[in-house]
Amino acid sequence: MKAEETVEIDLAGKTSIADAMIITSGRSQRHVGSIADKVIQEFKSRGFGNPRVEGMPACDWVLIDGGDILVHIFRPEVRHFYNLEKIWGADRPKDQTAHRLAG
């Protein structure tokens, strides 16, 4: 689907909400929606069931919650504004709850 600037952030030990976060961009609202549709189809076709989806009507930022994997698809301006890579990046302190559960 030609998603742009795709990054994966390992969330293991940082939070208990998911194991990984994928962040990517589409060039327009239509492109974001098309990428989201394809990701949702892939979740279903690979046997992961129906993921929870937020943001499809506007397609500025679509969040697909597949349980262990979160997928964020942004328009570039919206991605820059929220800057999830910085919030969830490598320098984020470990989640004490996740650490206690793992240990």
Image (cartoon, grey):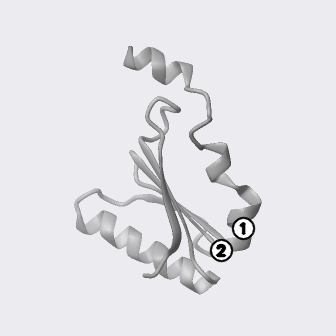
Q: In this orientation, which residue lies closer to the viewer: 2 or 32?
A: 2
Above or below residue 73? Residue 12 is above
Among the 4 quarters of the image, the one containing residue 103: top left
| Residue to which mark 1 is pinned | 78
Q: Can you give x and y, in whole percent of width and height, for residue 32 in the image? A: 56, 77
Q: Amino acid at mark 2?
A: Arg
Give the percent coordinates (x, y) of residue 47: 23, 59
Do residues under tags 1 and 2 come within 8 Å of each other at their CB atoms? yes
Considering the numbered disc 1 on the image, is that residue within a helix, a strand or a loop?
helix
The reply, left or right, for residue 81 in relation to residue 50 is right
Q: Quarter holding the N terminus?
A: bottom left
Q: Is residue 45 left or right of residue 65?
A: left
Q: Please provide percent x and percent y for residue 18.
A: 45, 41
The residue positioned farthest toward the front in the image shown: 91
Judged left or right of residue 87, residue 17 is left
Q: Determine whether 16 is above or below 64 in the image.
A: above
Other residues around mark 1 within 10 Å, as few (<14) / some (14–19) / many (≥20): few
Q: Is residue 6 above or below residue 18?
A: below
Can you say whether 21 is above or below 28 in the image?
above
Q: Which residue is mark 2?
A: 75
Q: Which mark is residue 29?
A: none
Residue at image location 63% in from the left, 84% down from the top: 28
Q: Secondary structure at mark 2?
A: loop
- Residue 97 drawn at (x, y percent): 52, 20
Q: Amino acid at mark 1?
A: Val
Nearer to us in this view, 80 or 63: 80
Q: CA distance from mark 1 to mark 2?
A: 5 Å
Is 47 displayed left or right of 23 in the figure? left
Task: Give the residue displayed 39% in from the left and 76% down from the top.
Answer: 38
Identify the residue at image location x=47%, y=77%. Answer: 35
Q: Look at 55% across and 83% down and name the residue there.
A: 31
Q: Residues within 10 Å of mark 2 (few under 14, many from 20)?
A: many
